[in-house]
Image: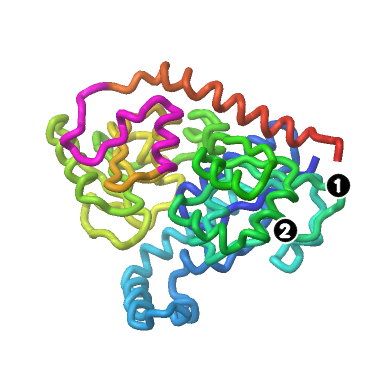
């Protein structure tokens, strides 16, 4: 069976890369010929472009566009290093369809899977993107499936703007699943179809799968801070734990809008970031996939987020680790995660998600 996956595989982003690899690898191990459809989403390409001046000039705020362009020029070497690392990851670990955007409708897969990641985040994508709803010509008997599709609660209000299209597109799916309960509840306003809640695809692989491909860092005996958005609270907690344990602090920022210095690691690819997580004494993060891989690798984990994050709370709740979601070092408690309990909590969730994929891909009553 040939399967085409549409996701954010072209995003130079740790989580996007990891979940793309995980879903494709899982399906391949189940005997499917799974490939990532090499769709180039303009909104995603813009986010991760380095020196494309035309993209910056398209922004409404010209002064901001110029400042971002100059910042990227100043950090070009590190940004280029990061882009090369992600390009190398895609070439070595992802099997991509041989097509451009105009040729997608000529692909001949038996099933198409939309997901995972925030493919239904209308704020991020500047509206409804038809490709991530599998709205393009395909073989008549091809299955349309979503797996652990995600969005941000902050973009839910945009669903009403595209209500008619959203109702039609959700109805076209043979099987629907999302990653968070909040998105399931919201989409229930636009469809009567059953919507499953499935685990992020990174959990479909085991720790040994990531250990085989990650790159071990030179540093040892450190606390890792992995920021999506830099927060003083994360740094304060890291410094606090490091002082108590006599360790150093390493910081990785998902973007380049962060400090430079010995403790700040920049220009890293996904396998290098995974390596830093693997060999850290403790991981402090506000990244969904930073938290996910920390759990998979059985790391001491703290999630600091000054704002409510449904995605992170869902992740930690499913793992029985909500006590690890804190807002400052004042809530820190000296205790160790019992990963035997975490594994027990996640086993049924993983099993249910695997069952969803198995049943949807073996559906033959179309």
The colour scheme is rainbow
Residue 311 versus residue 272: which sits nearer the camera?
A: 311
Image coords of residue 42 (percent x, y): 57, 68
Image coords of residue 251 (percent x, y): 27, 48
What residue is shown with label 2?
135
* Residue 234 sits inside the magenta stretch: no
Spatial distance from mark 2 to mark 1, Cα to Cα?
A: 15 Å
How many callouts does the rendering have?
A: 2
Apparent side of residue 113 relative to residue 77 in the rendered image (left or right) = right
The crowd level at tag 1 (other Cα within 10 Å; few <14, some 14-19, many 20+) is few
Span shown in magenta: 310-335
The crowd level at tag 2 (other Cα within 10 Å; few <14, some 14-19, many 20+) is some
What residue is shown with label 1?
141
Image coords of residue 340 (percent x, y): 42, 16
Could you tell me which secondary element the residue under label 1 belongs to?
A: loop
**Residue drawn at (66%, 42%), measured in percent from left and top?**
176
């Amino acid at each position: 069976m040939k399967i085409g996956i549409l996701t954010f595989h072209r995003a130079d982003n740790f989580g996007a890369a990891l979940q793309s690899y995980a879903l494709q690898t899982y399906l391949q191990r189940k005997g499917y010929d799974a490939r990532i459809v090499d769709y180039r989403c303009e909104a995603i390409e813009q986010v991760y472009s380095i020196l494309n001046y035309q993209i910056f000039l398209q922004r409404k705020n010209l002064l901001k566009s110029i400042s971002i362009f100059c910042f990227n020029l100043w950090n070009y070497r590190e940004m280029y290093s990061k882009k090369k690392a992600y390009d190398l990851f895609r070439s070595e670990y992802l099997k991509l369809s041989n097509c451009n955007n105009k040729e997608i409708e000529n692909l001949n897969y038996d099933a198409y899977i939309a997901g995972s990641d925030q493919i239904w985040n209308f704020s991020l994508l500047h509206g409804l993107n038809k490709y991530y709803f599998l709205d393009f010509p395909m073989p008549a008997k091809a299955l349309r499936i979503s797996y652990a599709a995600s969005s941000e609660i902050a973009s839910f209000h945009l669903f009403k703007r595209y209500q008619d299209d959203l109702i039609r597109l959700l109805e076209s799916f043979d099987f629907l699943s999302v990653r968070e309960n909040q998105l399931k509840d919201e989409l229930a306003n636009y469809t009567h179809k059953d919507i499953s809640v499935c685990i992020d695809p990174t959990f479909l692989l085991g720790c040994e799968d990531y250990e085989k491909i990650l790159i071990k860092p030179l540093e040892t005996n450190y606390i890792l801070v992995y920021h999506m958005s830099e927060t003083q609270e994360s740094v304060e907690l890291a410094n606090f734990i490091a002082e108590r344990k006599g360790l150093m602090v390493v910081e990785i920022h998902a973007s380049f809008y962060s400090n430079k210095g010995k403790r700040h690691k920049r220009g890293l690819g996904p396998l290098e970031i995974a390596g830093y997580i693997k060999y850290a004494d403790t991981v402090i993060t506000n990244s969904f996939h930073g938290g996910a891989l920390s759990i998979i690798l059985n790391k001491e984990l703290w999630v600091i987020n000054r704002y409510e994050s449904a995605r992170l709370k869902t992740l930690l709740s499913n793992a029985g680790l909500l006590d690890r979601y804190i807002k400052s070092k004042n809530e820190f408690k000296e205790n160790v995660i019992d990963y035997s309990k975490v594994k027990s909590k996640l086993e049924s969730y993983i099993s249910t998600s695997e069952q969803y994929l198995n049943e949807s891909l073996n559906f033959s009553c179309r």
